[in-house]
């Protein structure tokens, strides 16, 4: 059984004549790294957000036959308690902007600690140890000092690492990364990808990596789903999609990345 199985996902916004995502199916196996690529507006983010039911359901609805099955449970019919237990624990998500996750008025260590404690029975002292270890695991040197700093005292790359530490502290089985490295300069991006690589490897953590960057896909993903205008145009092992794309759209996406052709 797949760890995650998105089946016939349809997302229709109120007032829209056509669905923004239609008939999208994506599977992620335990420990697998699956990429979703496609130009801006192709439906990558709203697909990813459906896994944790993060789309605003007052303005959109899921298709009648759509299912998003994680570990045997359809998230689209899960109750609030189930969603709360899953978010940040079995599944966590990282985004392009760490400040959408970090609260500017609290020290970062405490924020990671609070997230961890909502999902565990750790004592405060144990949780602090886990947070420091998570900082260490994401390549934050001097974890003790960073623990007591405020978000604005950290560089962008450092804040990104704190957000990743927050996402992995509870040892999720699935990490969803939505353009999480897109805003970083190439050196920091490479370091963050290395970190995710190592964590995925060490923990058998599956990753759903949303990006418009073919270089990230080539570097990180086992398999890739190509989306265009709310639909899947092709899916396959990364090597096959990159070297022998079946669709014109994928070929165009590839040709926009000169470094893969050098
Ligand atoms: N809040 C919203 N209200 C109305 N339509 C939306 C909203 N968010 C997304 N959409 C529609 O869904 C499409 C896909 O959005 P998104 O998943 O964010 O694209 P991507 O992440 O691939 O850039 C958009 O092009 C837009 O048509
Ligand atoms: Mg997006």
Image: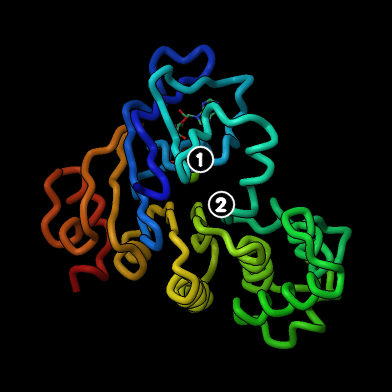
| Helix, strand or loop status at disc 1 | helix
Which of the two discs, 1 and 2, labels the residue nearer the N terminus? 1
Q: What residue do we see at 14% from left, 52% from top?
A: 245
Q: What is the x, y in percent for residue 112? A: 75, 64
Q: What residue do we see at 45% from left, 25% from top?
A: 11
Viewport quadrant of the C terminus:
bottom left
The answer to whether 36 is drawn above or below residue 5 in the figure is: below
- Which residue lies most toward the bottom here? 142
For the image shown, how many numbered marks are present on the structure? 2
Q: Pointer 2: what residue? A: 91
Q: In the visual, does 261 lie left or right of 189?
A: left
- Residue 135, by quadrant, is bottom right
Q: CA distance from mark 1 to mark 2?
A: 9 Å
Q: Residues within 10 Å of mark 1 (few under 14, many from 20)?
A: many
Q: Which mark is residue 51?
A: 1
> Between residues 113 and 14, which one lies in front from this camera angle?
113
The answer to whether 48 is drawn above or below residue 182 in the figure is: above
| Helix, strand or loop status at disc 2 | strand
Give yes or no for contact between labels 1 and 2 (Cβ–Cβ under 8 Å). Answer: yes
Q: What residue do we see at 41% from left, 54% from top?
A: 211
Q: What is the x, y in percent for residue 164? A: 61, 65
Q: Residues within 10 Å of mark 2 (few under 14, many from 20)?
A: many
């Amino acid at each position: 059984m797949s760890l995650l199985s998105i089946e016939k996902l349809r997302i229709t916004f109120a007032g829209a004549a056509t669905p923004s995502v239609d008939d999208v199916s994506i599977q992620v196996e335990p420990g697998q790294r699956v990429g979703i690529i496609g130009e801006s507006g192709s439906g990558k983010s709203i697909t990813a957000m459906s896994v944790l039911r993060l789309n605003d359901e007052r303005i959109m609805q899921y298709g009648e036959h759509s299912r998003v099955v994680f570990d045997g449970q359809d998230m689209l019919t899960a109750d609030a308690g189930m969603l709360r237990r899953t978010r940040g624990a079995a599944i966590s998500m990282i985004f392009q902007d760490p400040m959408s996750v970090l609260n500017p008025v609290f020290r970062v260590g405490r924020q990671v600690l609070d997230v961890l404690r909502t999902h565990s029975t750790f004592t405060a002292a144990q949780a602090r140890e886990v947070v420091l270890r998570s900082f260490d695991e994401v390549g934050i040197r001097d974890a003790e000092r960073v623990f007591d700093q405020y978000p604005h005292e950290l560089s962008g790359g450092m804040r990104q690492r704190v957000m990743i530490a927050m996402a992995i502290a509870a040892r999720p089985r699935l990490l969803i990364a939505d353009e999480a490295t897109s805003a970083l300069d190439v050196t920091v991006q490479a370091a963050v990808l290395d970190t995710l690589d190592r964590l995925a490897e060490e923990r058998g953590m599956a990753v759903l990596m949303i990006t418009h960057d073919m270089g990230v896909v080539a570097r990180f993903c086992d398999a890739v789903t190509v989306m265009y205008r709310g639909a899947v145009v092709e899916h396959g092992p990364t090597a096959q999609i990159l070297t022998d794309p079946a669709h014109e759209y994928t070929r165009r996406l590839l040709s926009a990345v000169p470094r893969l052709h050098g």
